[in-house]
Image (cartoon, rainbow, N blue to C red):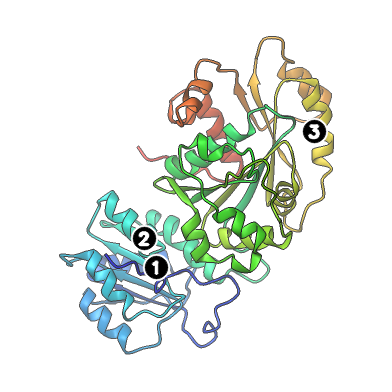
Amino acid sequence: MQNISSAIAPPAPGNDTQAATRSKFIGFARDEPSARLLGQALQDILPGDNHIHIVDFRATLAILAEMTTPQIILVDLSGEDQPINAMTDLAEVVEPGTLVLAIGESQNVSFYRTVTKGMGVREYLAKPLTRAAVEENFIPAIANVAPPSGAPRGGRLITLAGARGGVGASTIASNLAWLIGTGLHRHTVLLDAELHTGTTALNLNVETNNGLGIALESPQRVDSLLIERSIQPAGERVHVLAGHIGLEQPLDYAHESAGLLVTALRTRYNFVIADAGARFGVFARDLIFLAQQRVVVMDPSMIAIRNLERLLALPSSAGVSPRALLVLNRAGTPGGLSQHYMEQNMGLRFDAVIPDLPRIVPKTTQFGEQAAALRGPYRSAILTLASALGASAPEAA
């Protein structure tokens, strides 16, 4: 199978030199009901430019071959006996830097993963279409190509920091990313800020590589291709970007790389969940500075209360939420402070409270599984946190 991600690829942020001469969008659907629904669903994001042509896929190829490819195309693979081969044919007529959306008849999960992970299609929806599905999956991708003036570009960067070591920030970050991607169906990447001792890849049972280290040491190499090669799938819509280097191996970190990496990830994902840990190395501090939303994870201890003030006083970039979200982990643990006492002492309320579950959380973590996959208080608490972060879409059955 030919890999065509280099021909059909998301445009590099702020670097599409043909954008000024290319039209914004062209769409194709094989049947009139689909064309009508797509036009209605996209009318707010593409006012006056959302006309969907009613033609089959072979006619779509002929039209695209005779024109300068728009920034965004939407194609219908319905009726194609070999839709993978059809995508290969599409690569021959589509210019690099084009964002491709697709619809079709196949409801096979393997097909979805093949075209979205290996063939450069940003998003695929199976028929019958619904307006809610189109708005949830296609509109964010379109918005990332040309966001409104002054608005933040792409998805949100959320950093989770531990008020002290061992509070469970990495476990919560892993479960949060997994639940937003798998349960709430939002494209999510989990980013580990600690390359020497980070655990997010282990928590989600995926392999690490040297891609993140390359990105942090050589910011000029940060692009969609490096990200594509470095991320590891951990679910249908959740990926992990993590490294694991030896303690004796220094990291020649370039400060500008954090901003470039975050920008590239935000153009691709709805949510970038960064595990900043509790050691706060230079990369972790940069991620905290850049985040649109900060989350501080605490345990029921006086040390956590003492360190909270310093965390809340850290400087931030423009666009960051004025208030960090607070999570109390292991509430009710024997010998720990009560939630009521902590809230009175801090003068703040917790946004999510996770009970102490010593028989569930350590066991699932040991096997690279997620406690949030189990119905119960842990999942409910992670859902509460996800809702507070704006990821409150209804869960699939």
Q: Is residue 382 left or right of residue 93?
A: right
Mark number displayed over residue 157: none
- Reading the image, the residue beneath label 1 is 5
Q: Residue at x 82, y 29 (%)?
A: 347
Q: Is residue 219 above or below residue 136?
A: below
Residue 8 appears in which quarter of the rendering? Answer: bottom left
Q: Which circle, 3 or 2, is nearer the viewer?
A: 2
- Reading the image, the residue beneath label 3 is 308
Disc 3 from disc 1: Cα separation:
44 Å
- Reading the image, the residue beneath label 2 is 118
Q: Earlier in the sequence, mark 1 or mark 2?
A: 1
Task: Label 1, secondary structure: give it.
Answer: loop
Q: Is residue 80 left or right of residue 349?
A: left
Q: Residue at x 60, y 43 (%)?
A: 389
> What crowding class fits label 3: few (fewer than 14 Cα within 10 Å), some (14-19), or many (20 or more)?
some
Q: Amino acid at mark 3?
A: Leu
* Residue 111 in picture, x, y percent from top left: 27, 55
* Residue 265 in picture, x, y percent from top left: 56, 58
Q: Earlier in the sequence, mark 3 or mark 2?
A: 2
Q: Nearer the viewer, residue 220 or 370?
A: 220
Looking at the rendering, in which quadrant would you find the N terminus? bottom left
